[in-house]
Amino acid sequence: VYPFIEAENAADSGNVKRACTLLKVSRAAYYAHRCAKPSARARQDAELTEEIVAIHDESNGTYGTPRLHAELRARGRRHSRKRVARLLRAAGRAGRAPKRWRTTTVPDPAVDTPADLIKRDFSCSASDINVRWCGDITYIHTWEGWLYLATVIDLGSRRVVGWATADHLRTDLIAEALNNAVAHRRPAPGVIFHSD
């Protein structure tokens, strides 16, 4: 509506009152729109938002409000923390928190530590097949939650000889992986299994 009134005003007749009446717009609204300028605060916010986005990009998206606020202060820009948070939110940005470490293996303090029969020698030769096995557990994040994978690896052939998956970290998972390895390889008595 307002561009049409602007065009009418620019014409020779220059009758803003008539155009506003025809379009059912008050003249005050037209002039308010025509003279509307962003306030000084809005201009400062726009300038500060640009700087916040630049700092956020420099940090690869890791900086949140506290670090952005500190960085702005170091650059001589003194603004409240809440203002920085509001502008960061308005820009559609957020800081990234580091992932928390989950402890998955907790040894029982009452049990004696078994002897290391391999003595940290993980070298192998072709004749060492089904002599020394090694095992570990890893966890995989899926859409339905955590999936735990236990594996048994033959150090002689460097192949996975047994494995098992479950949604828990109980002893059954490791026992199932070992049973799977024994069923597939049928080792001679005396095979050494090393695990943490």
Image (cartoon, rainbow, N blue to C red):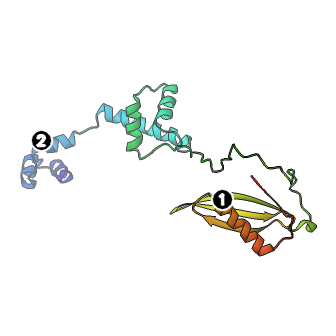
Q: Is residue 194 above or below residue 35?
A: below
Closer to us: 138 or 20: 138
Mark 1 neighbour class, 10 Å CA radius: few under 14, some 14 to 19, many 20 or more: few
Identify the residue at horizontal 69%, vertical 61% (top origin): 174
119 horizontally vs 13: left or right = right
Q: Is residue 163 above or below residue 96?
A: below
In the image, what residue occupies the spot 10% across and 54% down?
A: 23
Residue 149 visible? no
Give the labeled residue for mark 2.
28
Q: Is residue 25 visible?
A: yes
Residue 11 picture location, percent across and down: 16, 51
Of badges 2 and 1, the one in the foreground is: 1
Residue 39 is left or right of residue 17, and the answer is: right
Numbered disc 1: secondary structure: helix
Residue at position x 48%, y 26% in the image: 73
Q: Quarter of the image containing the N terminus? A: bottom left
Mark 1 belongs to which amino acid? Thr
Q: Disc 2 marks which amino acid?
A: Ala
For residue 163, what is the image quadrant? bottom right
